Amino acid sequence: MKQIFLVEDDSAIAKNLSLLLYGEGFGVTHASNRSGAEQLLSTHRFDLALVDISLPDGNGFTVCTEIKAQQDIPVIFLTASGDEASVVTGLNMGADDYITKPFRPRELVARIKAAFRKSGKGSFVFEVGGLSVDTASGIVKKDGSEVFLSALEYRLLLVFVSNPRSIITRDRLLNELWDAAGEFVTNNALTVYIKRLREKIEEDPAKPQIILTVRGTGYRLGV
């Protein structure tokens, strides 16, 4: 799952953008100001950043410079101003694109996908335990044979392959599936999804080697 870094001080805009991006299959981490963005940059890895030019404790140009210095990812500026000088400044600072508020949701998604294509970060193939996940095509294979997953099973698998070295809590998985399904997912339902996914991707679902249980915490990828 591609991780989007959203730096936006307007809470209503941030909430709506997060829902839009979740619905498109992206993960979203939000910072409401420059200082918060700096802290998250030091602890998280992202695939693309959406940065508002106007922030309460600085401006998006500074954030863009910091992002480019720490992580080689595309940056798209969000601006309420059609001022040509601001646009030129942003592009000269290393931004990959800009979009002026208010914008159409589909246009923003198209710009994001275009930025991924230009950067060569549009997809990746992850392999573990004989399992291959191609995020460009959405094809999952086990020992060379295609495995057919439901939308929620695929979303669940993407959470793990996008965070290969992390313990994923049940609460986080519930939130991810809730966003994907558009409805509340219960703890019992999550257990069922994990079971079904293991039945499709594990050699022996009773002794999983790909999705491991971390007792009392959640799960992690067996890499």
Image (cartoon, rainbow, N blue to C red):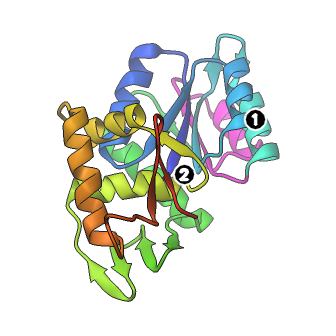
Give the x, y percent position of residue 27: 45, 42
Q: Secondary structure at mark 1?
A: helix
Task: Pick the residue in front: 199 or 135.
Answer: 199
Displayed quadrant of residue 200: bottom left
Query: In the image, 123: left or right of 37?
Result: left
**Residue 163: mark in rendering:** 2
Displayed quadrant of residue 23: top left
Give the residue pinned by disc 1.
Answer: 42
Give the x, y percent position of residue 202: 35, 71
Give the x, y percent position of residue 188: 20, 37
**Residue 97: mark in rendering:** none
Displayed quadrant of residue 63: top right
Q: Residue furthest top?
A: 56
**Label 1 crowd (10 A; few <14 / some 14-19 / many >=20):** few
Q: Earlier in the sequence, mark 2 or mark 1?
A: 1
Residue range highlighted in magenta: 72-96
**Label 2 crowd (10 A; few <14 / some 14-19 / many >=20):** some
Tell whether position 100 is magenta: no
Tell whether position 81 is magenta: yes
